[in-house]
Amino acid sequence: MALQWPEPGAGPVAGVDEAGRGPLAGPVVAAAVILDPARPIDGLDDSKKLSEAARERLAIEIRDKALAWAVAEASAAEIDRVNILQATFLAMRRALDGLAVTPQQALIDGNKVPPGLSCAGEAVVKGDGRIAAIAAASILAKTHRDALMRELALAHPEYGFERHMGYPTPAHFAALQAHGPCPAHRRSFAPVAQLALF
């Protein structure tokens, strides 16, 4: 199914998506993208359906061709303080507020609209496979977060973040058992909290 692109001449609409709600470590990242109908981008899709190489290539093209884009984070500490859903909303608001062009509407991937948006918001279930701007946001959020986790792996090589990106894999659990949590771990998440090593 072809993704829905913004209509030429319509007011600016931002697609918004996140990456990293499920991991045990690292931030949750959100991106907001306003696409230019006059500058199409071939190959946009839900980031989870794309190879790493395709995501990286498309991320460059999105940043080059979009009318506006922004990426924002909520840290592991913020996740622990307000919970993962509210931290995701916080990252989404930050991404929208970071856009150089003010959108008339934000299309949010999922079934909830973050409270306190600076524009009208609409939730779109499975929007990253339906709306081009949301697909673009999913790609920017995923590639940005993966880059952050690779940087984190340099500071904490014992956890293998560059391989599992903080997700709860057997290798990650084994590293947690051996070394305990590091500052990037989400201490409010049960698998980390249950270790009680901090």
Image (cartoon, grey):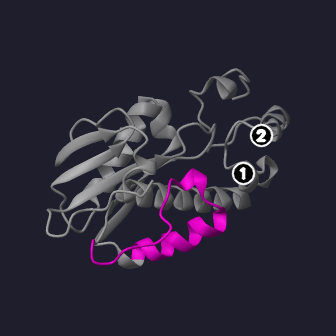
Q: Which residues are magenta?
A: 37-63
The residue at the point 49 percent across, 75 percent down is 60
User: In the picture, residue 51 is in which quadrant?
Assistant: bottom right
- Tell me where residue 147 appears, x and y as whole percent: 60, 62
Lateral position of residue 150 relative to residue 178, left or right: left
**The one of 77 and 43 positioned closer to us in this rendering:** 43
- Tell me where residue 197 appears, x and y as whole percent: 74, 27
Question: Does 41 lie within the magenta span?
Answer: yes
- Tell me where residue 17 appears, x and y as whole percent: 41, 49
Which mark sits nearer the N-terminus, 2 or 1?
A: 1
User: In the picture, residue 178 is in which quadrant?
Assistant: top right
Helix, strand or loop at label 1? It is: helix
Is 119 rendered above or below residue 178?
A: below
Amino acid carrying mark 1 in the image: Phe
- Tell me where residue 68 appears, x and y as whole percent: 29, 69
Q: Decide: few, some or many residues near mark 1? Use Cα within 10 Å; few <14, some 14-19, many ≥20.
A: many
User: Which quarter of the image is occupied by the C terminus?
Assistant: top right
**The one of 11 and 158 positioned closer to us in this rendering:** 11
Label 2 belongs to which residue?
Answer: 172
Q: Decide: few, some or many residues near mark 2? Use Cα within 10 Å; few <14, some 14-19, many ≥20.
A: many
The residue at the point 27 percent across, 63 percent down is 99
Is 3 rendered above or below residue 121?
A: below
Label 1 belongs to which residue?
Answer: 161
Amino acid carrying mark 2 in the image: His
Count the labels in the image: 2
**Does residue 74 appear anywhere in the picture?**
no
Is 193 rendered above or below residue 133?
A: above
Helix, strand or loop at label 2? It is: helix
**The one of 33 and 126 positioned closer to us in this rendering:** 126
The residue at the point 82 percent across, 40 percent down is 175
